[in-house]
Image (spheres, grey):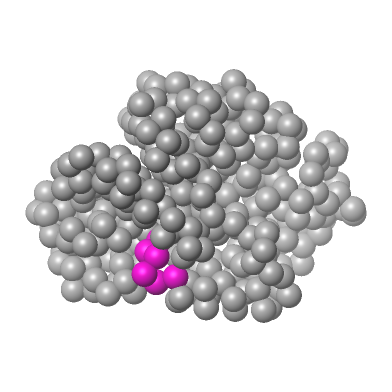
């Protein structure tokens, strides 16, 4: 099992120990370091800044939001970081949700699957650099010929030759159609709130995409976000995780369109999801966290002593996960996870 350090996105201020965590990930054998973005800090800049002190770990985004940049602009970020890192960059993309896409980026959210397909197609064209980039689709037309166009748009190839035509593109996906699209057009799946118990269901979704593309799972990566904590007090750690679970169920999406809530509903926690959503929307966030069941947290995290962690990591690996994306608060936690997951 490979480990990826998930730095996440920033809160009100930049984290104070991120450079130390990245250095520790490099030292203790982590495979990769990932950064994210929401509606504050971006995901590319931290990787360029803190990643400049590394030489081995892969540097990835988990995830950058597609609506934040045109496909060509995103490809420019990716090829630049891939050159600067010597071919260690992984581009992780996600569609986000309508609240952020329409409220923050001012873009329409409709038809996310079709938008994703076009976006990735343009990225592949840029990286291949075989011909001027064109796209006839309605979401990202190149050259642009719509309202306000002067008719002077010219198909272009990137000035800078990409380091790798096959730079890996991973997609953050939660629903069955999006996961199937991921295995059809991408090189990896960034899974949030993965549950090994449902591995058979996930495999059906993935196999649908593989069948459409004719590709195999052999070189496909499944990177699952998972809180892995080595501790003698698992109950206390699970209690600390519950507010974050409640936030994503009740607050990271619109009522009636919350993709995270749908994940837990598919897991069999539909009634709990409704209760958490109602409490969260009413501003009763502490009560919402208390409603989160222990067994739900146990399904999506690995918490316990070193022996328990090793056993659970093997179980997740057998379920098809190739990388665990973990958050660590300090260098000691990075070292402990490295030792426990060997």
Q: How many numbered callouts?
A: 0
The image quarter containing residue 339 is top left
Task: Name the image quarter holding residue 97.
Answer: bottom left
Residue at image location 71% in from the left, 74% down from the top: 213
Residue 90 in the figure: left or right of residue 160: left
Is the magenta region chiefly helix, strand or loop?
helix
**Was residue 226 drawn as part of the magenta stretch in this picture?**
no
Magenta stretch in the rendered image: 194-199
Whole-percent x, y for residue 56 in the image: 64, 31
Residue in the foreground of this view, choosing between 143 and 148: 143
Q: Is residue 109 visible?
A: no
Write the residue at 83% across / 51% down.
128
- Residue 337 seen anywhere in this rendered image of the structure: yes
**Residue at screen point 18% across, 58% down:** 294
Q: Is residue 67 above or below residue 161?
A: below
Q: Is residue 211 above or below residue 157?
A: below
The x and y percentages for residue 174 are: 45, 65
Q: Is residue 196 magenta?
A: yes
């Amino acid at each position: 099992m490979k480990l990826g350090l998930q730095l996440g996105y920033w809160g009100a201020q930049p984290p104070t120990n991120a450079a130390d965590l990245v250095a520790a990930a490099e030292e203790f054998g982590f495979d990769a370091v990932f950064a994210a973005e929401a509606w504050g800090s971006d995901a590319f800049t931290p990787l360029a800044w803190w990643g400049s002190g590394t030489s081995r770990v892969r540097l990835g985004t988990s995830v950058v939001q597609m609506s934040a940049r045109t496909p060509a602009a995103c490809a420019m970020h990716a090829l630049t970081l891939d050159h600067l890192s010597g071919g260690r960059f992984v581009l992780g993309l996600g569609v986000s949700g309508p609240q952020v896409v329409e409220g923050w980026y001012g873009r329409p959210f409709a038809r996310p699957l079709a938008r994703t397909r076009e976006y990735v197609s343009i990225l592949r064209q840029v990286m291949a650099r075989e011909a001027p980039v064109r796209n006839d689709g309605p979401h990202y037309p190149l050259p642009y010929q719509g309202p306000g166009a002067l008719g002077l748009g010219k198909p272009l190839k990137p000035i800078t030759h990409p380091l790798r035509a096959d730079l890996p593109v991973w997609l953050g996906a939660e629903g069955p159609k999006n996961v199937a699209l991921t295995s059809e057009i991408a090189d990896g799946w960034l899974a949030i709130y993965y549950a090994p118990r449902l591995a058979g269901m996930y495999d059906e979704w993935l196999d649908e995409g593989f069948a459409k593309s004719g590709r195999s799972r052999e070189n496909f990566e499944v990177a699952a976000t998972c809180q892995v904590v080595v501790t003698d007090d698992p109950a206390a750690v699970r209690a600390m995780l519950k507010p974050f679970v409640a936030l994503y169920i009740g607050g990271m999406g619109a009522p009636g369109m919350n993709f995270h809530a749908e994940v837990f509903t598919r897991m069999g926690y539909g009634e709990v999801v409704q209760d958490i959503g109602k409490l969260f929307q009413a501003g009763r966030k502490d009560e919402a966290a208390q409603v989160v069941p222990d067994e739900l947290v146990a399904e999506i995290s690995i918490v316990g002593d070193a022996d328990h962690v090793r056993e659970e990591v093997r179980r997740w690996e057998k379920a098809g996960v190739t990388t665990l994306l973990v958050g660590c608060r300090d260098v000691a936690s990075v070292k402990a996870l490295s030792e426990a997951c060997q």
